[in-house]
Image (cartoon, rainbow, N blue to C red):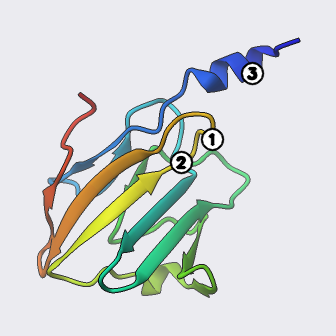
């Protein structure tokens, strides 16, 4: 027997985009962002950002001010304070969003300059 919640979850997607004006990652569904992976192969740095609060996860994440409901893990080992999170400038990062486990990951690339994100591979949900 298939439950209604299973059917509803299967309809979700993990699509995300980056809004340059607000400097936020935004999810293209009504559900919140519960799990992001941000990485750069040449720097060998990977961040796992996971929603751990009991409240509902937000649909948007500012990379300049990560909500305290998230736990940030660097390279799969070290938990870092949200206030210490900072991406290296002049680097291209790959972002994978996997909040809805049965849907494929939402992928996004962003380029960080000294002024913040200046380029992104997706600017809307289309």
**Against 46, is 21 above or below?**
above
Picture quarter containing residue 5? top right
Q: Which mark is residue 8?
A: none
Q: Secondary structure at mark 2?
A: loop
> Quick check: 112 left or right of 32?
left
Compute the Cα span from label 1 to label 2.
6 Å
Q: Which mark is residue 5?
A: 3
Q: Secondary structure at mark 1?
A: loop
Q: Nearer the viewer, residue 55 or 105?
A: 105
Picture quarter containing residue 17? top left
Tell me the residue that label 2 is attached to. 98
Discs 1, 2 touching: Cβ within 8 Å: yes
Give the percent coordinates (x, y) of residue 80.
55, 85
Query: Label 1: how many residues lie within 10 Å, few (<14), some (14-19) or many (20+)?
Result: some
Q: Nearer the viewer, residue 63 or 112?
A: 112
Tell me the residue that label 1 is attached to. 101
Give the residue at x 17% y 67%.
Answer: 111
Disc nearest the viewer among 3 and 1: 1
> Quick check: 54 left or right of 24?
right
Give the percent coordinates (x, y) of residue 44.
39, 84
Quadrant the N terminus occupies: top right
Q: Earlier in the sequence, mark 3 or mark 1?
A: 3
Q: Earlier in the sequence, mark 2 or mark 3?
A: 3
Picture quarter containing residue 64? bottom left
């Amino acid at each position: 027997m298939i439950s209604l919640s299973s059917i509803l979850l299967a309809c979700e997607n993990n699509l995300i985009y980056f809004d340059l004006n607000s400097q936020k990652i935004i999810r293209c569904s009504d559900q919140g962002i519960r799990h992001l992976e941000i990485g750069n192969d040449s720097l060998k740095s990977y961040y796992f950002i996971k929603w751990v609060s009991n409240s509902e996860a937000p649909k948007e994440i500012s990379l300049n001010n990560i909500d305290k409901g998230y736990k940030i893990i660097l390279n799969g080992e070290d938990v870092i304070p949200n206030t210490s999170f900072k991406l290296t400038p002049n680097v291209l990062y790959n972002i994978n969003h996997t909040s809805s486990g049965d849907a494929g990951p939402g992928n996004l690339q962003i380029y960080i300059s000294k002024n913040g994100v200046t380029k992104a591979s997706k600017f809307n949900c289309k």
